[in-house]
Image (cartoon, rainbow, N blue to C red):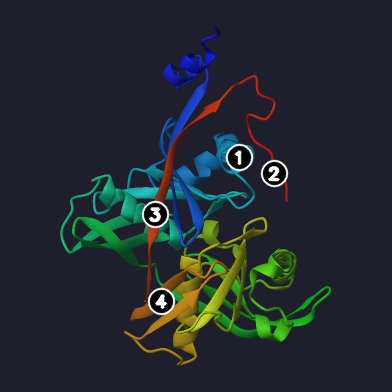
Amino acid sequence: MRDTHSKINSLKSFTPPAHWLKIKTIDMHTGGEPLRVIVDGFPMLRGTTVLERRNDIKVHHDHLRKALMHEPRGHADMYGCLLLPPNDNEADFGILFLHNEGYSSMCGHAVIAITKLAVEMTWVAITTPVTKVVIDAPCGRISSYANIENGKVTSVYFHGVPSFVVALDQQIEVEGLGTVSYDLAYGGAFYAYVNSNNLNLPLIPQNYNAFIQKGMDIKRAVIAQSDLVQHPFESDLSFLYGTIFIGNPVSDGLDSRNICVFANGEVDRSPTGSGVAGRMAIHYKRKEITIGEKMKIESITGSVFEGGVVEEVKYGNFDAVIPEVRGTAFITGQHEFLIDPDDPFSEGFFLR
């Protein structure tokens, strides 16, 4: 009698050859948007700041981003982060954000998730009922706060970098859409904000592919026709990250719905933390929200972020605000990814 089944029961772990690369991750989601947190096996990055290390990974280790974000280990809408030393001793750690196209400057859903993980893993000193985590992101320093009840993180909110409006009621010509009106704002990343009602495009999952096509068309048109996307201090941050469609909520008791198309056609499953931050600057500029007032914004999955304005600040020549964004995150698994150097798809592939 064969003993294959008994061997299966006793041998449940594969031992890879020593020369294979092994990268360990903890996977999470915030409002349905994935976050693959790299915790071990990634090469050390050169540089003394997060921005310097961001440039190093782009030049020397981009194949590992592709391996972890693209298929077969990831997918077209995968998202990840790499934890780094902070810029100085005033922060707990630094972070880089990874996606299907490259490296973003800010990611609110990742900040919410990594704050919860930092508490769950006791990487930071825990205080109850609120634990503060200070994070150095490419866009700047972020203060994040984990609410703790009965030893568990129940929600997280963060105070983002200064967020500001670049321009309101701009117009561009987009092939297939005609004249499109948009607002341009920064919430750690630059977005073009478009009212979906003007495009006859309901913000529902059935229009998923249309969001990708129209969002990328608008993004490309803004890049081609506008020179307004200029960060006041860092040229590395002067790029348009995505298009955010804004419309009426689908669920009761909420203020609005966001659908964000960013990077190379990724659709955010969450309401987009940095996008909500930029929206707070827009609503404050239009006098549609006051300091301390809250808005509840849902995503394509129905998940909700709560946004608000903490204070007014000056940021370069811009009248800016410090936004507050609140949400929840969950751990979904932990993995050891193996990269066989003989695998023709070791660096992954991208299909849309």
Tag 3 residue:
330
Query: What residue is drawn where x is 73% and y is 83%?
Result: 200
Marks 2/1 in contact by CB < 8 Å: the verdict is yes
Check the image and name the residue furthest to the bottom.
287
Residue type highlighted by circle 1: Lys
Query: How many angstroms separate mark 4 from mark 1 (CA)?
Result: 32 Å
Label 4 element class: strand
Tag 2 residue:
350
Residue 316 visible here: no
Residue 305 screen position, x and y as percent: 43, 71
Query: How many angstroms separate mark 3 from mark 1 (CA)?
Result: 24 Å
The residue mark sitting in front, 3 or 4, is 3
Tag 1 residue:
66
Marks 3/4 in contact by CB < 8 Å: the verdict is no
Tag 4 residue:
307
Query: How many angstroms separate mark 2 from mark 4 (CA)?
Result: 33 Å
Query: How many angstroms separate mark 3 from mark 2 (CA)?
Result: 26 Å
Label 1 element class: helix
Residue type highlighted by circle 4: Gly
Query: What residue is drawn where x is 53% and y is 27%?
Result: 338
Marks 3/2 in contact by CB < 8 Å: the verdict is no
